[in-house]
Amino acid sequence: MEIVPKIHVRSRLREMLVRLTAYVTIVVALVVTLFPIYWIAANSFKFDIDIFAVPPEWVPKNPTLKHYDEAFIQRPFLRYALNSFLVAVGTTIVSVCFGTMAGYALARFSYPWQWRRQISFWILSTRMMPPIVSIIPLYLFFNYFDMLNTKSALIIAYTAFNLPFATWMMKSYFQDLPVELEEAAMVDGDTRWGAFLHVALPLARPGLAATAIFCLIISWNEFLLSLIITLTEQSQTLPIGIAGRVTQYNTYWGEISAAGFMACVPIVVFAFMVQKHLVRGLSLGAVKG
Amino acid sequence: MVGSASGMSTAQLRPGGGLERWAERHLRVLMLAPTVIILLGLTIFPSIYMFYAAVHKISPNPDVPWDFVGPGNFVRLLSDQQFHVALLNTTVFTVLAVTVEFLLGLGLALLLDKYIRRLTFLKTMLMIPMMLPPIAVAITWKLIYEPQFGVLNEIMYRLGLPLQAWAGDVDLAMFSIIVADVWQWTPFIFLLMLAGLASLPVEPYEAAALDGASSWRQFWDLTLPFLKPVIAIALLLRVMDALRLFDLVFILTGGGPADRTKVLSLYIYQVAYRFADPGYAAAISLFVLFVTIILSTWFMNRMRLAD
């Protein structure tokens, strides 16, 4: 009779200790995660002399918008951002339109000789292809057709990895929908296409929105292909503009902090918009969160 | 699964134009065709073209015709020291970064699962790094690593430790790249592991507890086997991503110092543009593509991902 409460006390103490460790870990993880983002933001609002201060100025004492003026008014960062935006939207429209249809087909139809499995597999494997391996042919190809330094070339190149992504995402969302509703619509006289358009598509709307936002993020963040294809501010994207201010002789810290922080802001907004779909989006629909 | 048969029968019931009926009958092909054609054009065509480029010596001057060199570019791979260094660096980076991210992500998920499950807002905050543009991440860490006024050296100074050049130091450059990558991608493993843990069944654990199994035993015999599919997907995606590392290296070190962080993507880029030898770059690219295909096929087959 004496031992029982003793164990009870010990296990409760242990549980409290675990709980405490967990909360401390959460706080530490938050600080480690958010500090770098805070730091780039803080530095974008400092005068150059305060950026170089030792010890570092943890909170800007004389906040200024000087670097935002330098980057977005005097230098063409607004133009870069606009290019990024247009390319991202173009890629997203193409990828989501075709990807939704293909995803639906792979989720619902049957094909002879295991083609459904083979084609799904092949589409996924194109997503695994490292972009660096396609830069040589893409460069030579765009060079041949005089398309280097155009936004259309970027949209074509980005579609190569956004389309397989959109296909797999939509396939996974359509597989979650009950078939019966579409069957009922067809019994009522709707065509197969009609059932897709009027029944499945509206039901998959949250998935469609999440897929589109992920496509926007992927395109907005892309760097390597843009580095190869673009040459001037007519088509250069935001990451290229930022990298261009890290030169051999000088790094324009204020400017790149301002532009870098501005490149992050829409992404953070998007992250919260798709928070329910993060697991699925980041695992190409393979894990359903 | 709704077969095409039901689609056909309803189409025949409805009056409509011949074209419309034809489209309805071939819907399963028509809906898939655009994606397949686009992807064929964007992946198969470049691969063949790349093979064609790899057996030529290509001059940066577009007016000079390509010079057929046969397997010459592939033979060069065997003796090219720089290529071997890049291959080694990519391997070291991939193994170390993914291992650290995996252990850290899994450990955090196991510790925090119970406490963070309902704190969606907090969870999303922790997920932010992996969504950010890699270039923005790179300049952020460049600022932190800055030897003169960077935050990291300030911390070293306060702790009484020797100041370092970090990304500019021969021995610490790769370490610096890995730390930045771990910062960005541990949340990814953490997120997927949390999703895996949330889908665990309850009954086996109740049975194990009744049998008096220790929590360590429960982890090895129950949690880990249940998590295996999610772990495999997480590792596959991380490894594929690590193999293509470019942005961080491009900004933080440019491949230096002394080629210590020169990874395959960066080397291909340098060969193609700085050394103006696209034919040889194509040969290296084919090698990378080959490795990627083998790795991803092996992974995906094992996990039967395509279902």
Image: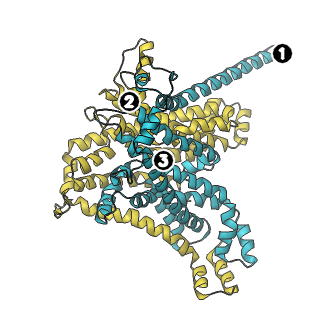
Chain colours: A cyan, B yellow
Instruction: Please rate how many residues cluster around mark 1, counting C-alpha atoms within 10 Å: few if below 14, some from 14 to 19, many from 20.
Output: few
- The residue singled out by tag 3 in the image is B237
Front residue of this view, candidates A146 and B201: A146
Please state if B174 lies on the left or on the right of B54 as rendered.
right
Q: Amino acid at mark 1?
A: Met
Front residue of this view, candidates A132 and B5: A132
Residue at the location (43% across, 46% down)?
Answer: A238
Q: Are marks 3 and 1 on the same chain?
A: no
Residue B42, above or below B169: below
Q: Amino acid at mark 2?
A: Phe
Label 3, label 1: how many angstroms apart (C-alpha)?
Answer: 55 Å
Please state if A251 lies on the left or on the right of A128 as rendered.
left
Q: Position of residue A197 (x, y in %)?
A: 65, 70
Q: Residue B175 bears which disc, if any? A: 2
Q: Disc 3 vs disc 1: which is toward the camera?
A: 3
Quarter of the rendering containing residue B283:
bottom left
Q: Residue A1 bears which disc, if any? A: 1
Q: Chain of mark 3?
A: B
Residue B1, above or below A137: below
